[in-house]
């Protein structure tokens, strides 16, 4: 008997090869620092979104005209991912689906546990290319969300993001009373820039190549407008400014014409300012810059905080006294101007379409419409659907071994899953990729089409009660592994987790408690190194030893910036995310438990490298063996990533990056050299899927070893974060 959870769908607009698609997705999940918003109106940007549509259409032409550049990329992909991984990337590119939208307004229907000053029922304006989609239900960080007090202006506040972009340009230009400001490009952001510059007390000159936009600019308050195709703008502005030039030029155009910045230099006075807000080609001569000593700057989107992970995703605000205007404060100011009717928008918002008529809306935009709003009706969407939770029972539903094909749900469609895991699963006999789940609905749809999966969704709860799904392969960001694994196990799914198993002692304890009650639930973690041919060969010889062994392992991990997601506190860091492989390998090779752990760290004098990036972890095993992991981000990538030396019984084994195996005191037949790495992924997955079809087969990694390696990893990470130390087990 199948169980189906009646969860309403959310419609969302996507783009594929120039075609507009309206697809059904699962309602967005609630994250700790996010609010879930039921969208009432979203704004289609005539500049950014039409450019995205046009770029999607021209990708094939781009490939043909830049064949040498793409050939170099292909070579790099083959080197990093191999033939299968590169083929997977090419297929993904061919089926690529993109989400559209970055400015909307609606009502909050759920709040994350760390959200402050916002509550369910508030009306809000939302921003963000990766959040404020054209969709019924969205999940948006609180720092990209501002309250709308007057509900009657909810439709107009769907333009807030574009207003914040224009406002940040004005702030970067430092426009003030008496300035003469030139706005080049009178699209939507240009029109808003004209109004904001006038409100700041400037005399405004507008420049464009379209008569209708020049007419709109006069309605927006421009004092003078020039048609760049009909007049010599340098000469005209010289006369308009008594041959001084304008004080400030704001470039709000979106064009790859090479003369735009150069013209801006010509029309701006000595020691004036030029600010780029739009997407223009930055090619110009040095001489006007040097001679006129012009200040040149670029305005970054909505304001300070944009693209800062800590600000946007973790809600860490900048102090008001030190950063007066953040992106959220810019958004709030635009909303206040709209509510006070101090921005004129009626002449800029041309039409309103229902989301179901999105194709017609985008067609109208191509015909020259400046700004179109999408509206949403919500007969089937309710507040409860947005924040699905899973109540875990201490006793899991029994796993039912499939008699025909094994149907797999992939939870998390990231880069590693696309280039390594999915190509392996797709080639296994009697295994079918049934569902692709990712919080990025466009990514889920793209990969589902590549592998012809029956379902694509952005909420993993949708697979839990589907009896057609036998196995969940979890490759989501690390913080979610334990929660998602336990939920799937509780619903009778077999689970394979792409390491780590847990990122905290609390999560590890939950796993232990679960398996204490449900010891036969099929579960494995992708600690693949132990399944590699080299390590199996080494294990065969080590098992014959008569004395303790000494193992040193060097992982030349490479630098990853501190703001990368894997470095965040939320996801545990790199020791938990990567070094766990080696701690499991030590347990596999020696078949012994740890007795004590000592960690030494290296801390950069400039404090730019987190200490867990550079450690030496020494583990004394109960059989007297000693293992040491040197994990460093300081090294050069050409030295190879992984290198191991094993010393035992008067013998030495060297393993060099899974490409070379050499033994001293061992038969010559032990020595091997291969052209491509085999770290054991293929064998681990084959053995796992054999085990989930045949109750007599064993999992590739025993549960006891998974929990032991995870505990070692958490202890090492804890000691490293404290600057080093020792702990006995």
Image (cartoon, helix red, strand yellow):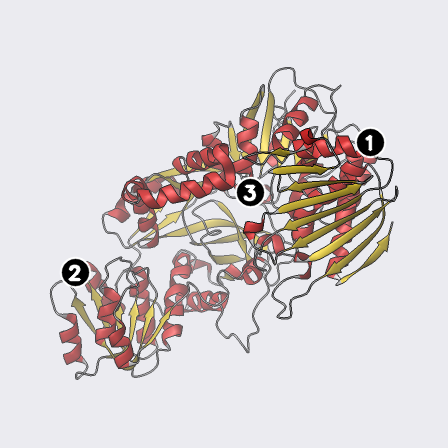
Q: What element carries label 2?
A: helix
Q: Can residue 343 be seen in this view?
A: yes
Query: Along the polypeptide, which appears first: circle 3 or circle 2?
Result: 2
Residue hosting label 1: 544
Answer with mark 1 or mark 2, whichever residue precedes in sequence.
Answer: 2
How far apart are the alpha carbons under marks 1 and 2?
86 Å
Examine the rendered structure and indicate whether residue 557 appears above or below residue 323. above
Residue 78: where, in percent of width, then height? 46, 38
Locate residue 310 relative to residue 269 in the image: left or right. Answer: right
List x then y, in percent, for residue 632.
65, 55
Q: Quick check: marks 3 and 2 in contact, CB under 8 Å? A: no
Query: Which residue appears at 63% of the width and 53% of the height?
Result: 32
Does residue 296 lie above or below 540 as drawn? below
Residue 235 drawn above or below residue 307 = below
Label 1's element?
Answer: loop
| 552 or 422, nearer to the observer | 552
Secondary element at tag 3: loop
Tag nearer the camera, 1 or 2: 1
| Horizontal side, residue 23 vs residue 390: left or right | left
- Which numbered marker is on residue 576? none
Q: Name the residue furthest left.
A: 230
Cα–Cα gap, marks 1 and 3 = 64 Å
Q: Using the numbered discs, state the Cα–Cα distance from disc 3 to disc 2 in whole angstroms.
A: 46 Å
Identified at 44% across, 53% down, the residue is 129
Residue 386: quadrant of the picture: top right
Residue that carries the numbered disc 3 in the rendered image: 382
Mark 3 crowd level (few <14, some 14–19, many ≥20, 10 Å Cα): some
Q: Mark 2 points at which residue?
A: 211
Instruction: Give neighbour class at mark 2: few <14, some 14-19, many 20+ (Cα, 10 Å).
Output: few
Quarter of the image for residue 518 reads top right
Q: Residues within 10 Å of mark 1 (few under 14, many from 20)?
A: few
> In this image, 570 relative to 199: left or right?
right
């Amino acid at each position: 008997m199948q169980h189906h959870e009646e969860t309403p769908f959310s419609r969302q607009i996507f783009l594929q090869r120039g075609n507009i698609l309206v697809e059904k997705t699962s309602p967005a999940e609630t994250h700790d620092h996010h609010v879930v918003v039921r969208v009432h109106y979203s704004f289609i940007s005539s500049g950014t979104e039409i450019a995205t549509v046009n770029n999607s259409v021209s990708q094939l032409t781009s490939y043909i005209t830049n064949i040498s550049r793409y050939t170099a990329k292909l070579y790099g992909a083959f080197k990093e991912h191999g033939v299968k991984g590169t083929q997977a990337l090419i297929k993904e590119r061919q089926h690529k689906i993109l989400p559209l939208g970055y400015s909307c307004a609606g009502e909050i229907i759920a709040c994350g546990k760390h959200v402050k000053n916002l509550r369910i029922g508030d009306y809000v304006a939302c921003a963000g290319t990766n959040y404020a989609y054209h969709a019924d239900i969205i999940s948006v960080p609180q720092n990209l969300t501002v309250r709308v007090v007057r509900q009657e202006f909810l439709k107009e506040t769907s333009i807030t993001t574009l207003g914040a972009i224009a406002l940040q340009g004005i702030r970067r230009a430092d426009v003030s009373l008496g300035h003469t400001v030139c706005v080049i490009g009178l699209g939507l952001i240009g029109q808003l820039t004209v109004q904001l510059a006038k409100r700041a007390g400037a005399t405004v000159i507008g420049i464009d190549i379209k008569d209708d936009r020049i007419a709109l600019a006069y309605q927006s308050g421009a004092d003078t407008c020039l048609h760049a195709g009909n007049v010599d703008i340098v000469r005209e502005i010289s006369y308009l400014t008594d041959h001084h030039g304008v004080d400030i030029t704001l470039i709000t155009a979106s064009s790859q014409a090479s003369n735009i910045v150069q013209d801006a230099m010509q029309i701006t006075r000595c020691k004036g300012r030029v600010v780029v807000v739009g997407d223009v080609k930055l090619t110009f001569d040095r001489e006007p810059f040097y001679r006129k000593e012009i200040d040149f700057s670029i305005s970054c989107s909505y304001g300070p905080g944009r693209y800062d992970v800590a600000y946007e995703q973790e809600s860490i605000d900048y102090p008001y006294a030190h950063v007066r205007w953040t992106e959220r404060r810019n958004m709030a100011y635009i909303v206040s101007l709209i509510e006070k009717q101090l921005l004129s928008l009626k002449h800029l918002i041309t039409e309103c379409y229902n989301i179901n008529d999105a194709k017609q809306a985008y067609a109208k935009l191509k015909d020259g419409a400046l700004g179109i709003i999408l509206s949403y009706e919500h007969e089937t969407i309710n507040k409860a659907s947005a924040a699905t939770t899973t109540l875990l029972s201490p006793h899991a539903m029994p796993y039912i071994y499939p008699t025909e094909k094994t149907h797999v749900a992939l939870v998390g469609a990231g880069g590693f899953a696309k280039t390594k895991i999915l190509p392996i699963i797709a080639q296994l006999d009697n295994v079918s990729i049934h569902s692709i789940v990712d919080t990025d609905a466009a990514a889920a749809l793209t990969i589902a089409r590549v592998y012809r999966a029956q379902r694509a969704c952005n909420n993993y709860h949708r697979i839990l009660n589907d009896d057609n799904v036998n196995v969940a392969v979890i490759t989501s960001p690390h913080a979610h592994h334990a929660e998602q694994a336990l939920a799937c196990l509780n619903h009778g799914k077999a689970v394979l987790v792409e390491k780590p198993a847990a990122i905290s002692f609390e999560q590890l304890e939950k796993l232990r408690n679960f398996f204490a009650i449900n010891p036969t639930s099929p579960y494995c973690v992708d600690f693949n190194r132990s399944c590699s041919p080299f390590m199996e060969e080494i294990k065969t010889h080590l098992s014959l030893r008569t004395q303790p062994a000494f193992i040193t392992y060097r992982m030349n991990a490479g630098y990853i910036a501190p703001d990368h997601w894997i470095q965040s506190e939320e996801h545990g860091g790199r020791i938990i995310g990567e070094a766990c492989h080696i701690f499991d390998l030590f347990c596999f090779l020696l078949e012994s438990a740890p007795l004590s752990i000592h960690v030494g760290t290296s801390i950069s004098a400039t404090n730019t490298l987190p200490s867990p990036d550079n450690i030496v972890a020494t583990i004394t095993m109960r059989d007297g063996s000693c293992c040491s992991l040197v994990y460093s981000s300081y090294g050069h990538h050409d030295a190879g990533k992984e290198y191991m030396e094993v010393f035992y019984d008067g013998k030495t084994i060297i393993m060099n990056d899974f490409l070379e195996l050499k033994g001293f005191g061992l038969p010559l037949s032990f020595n091997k050299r291969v052209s491509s790495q085999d770290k054991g992924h293929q064998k681990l997955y084959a053995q796992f899927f054999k085990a989930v079809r045949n109750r007599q087969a064993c999992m590739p990694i025993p549960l006891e070893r998974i929990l032991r390696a995870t505990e070692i990893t958490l202890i090492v990470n804890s000691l490293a974060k404290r600057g080093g130390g020792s702990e006995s087990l």
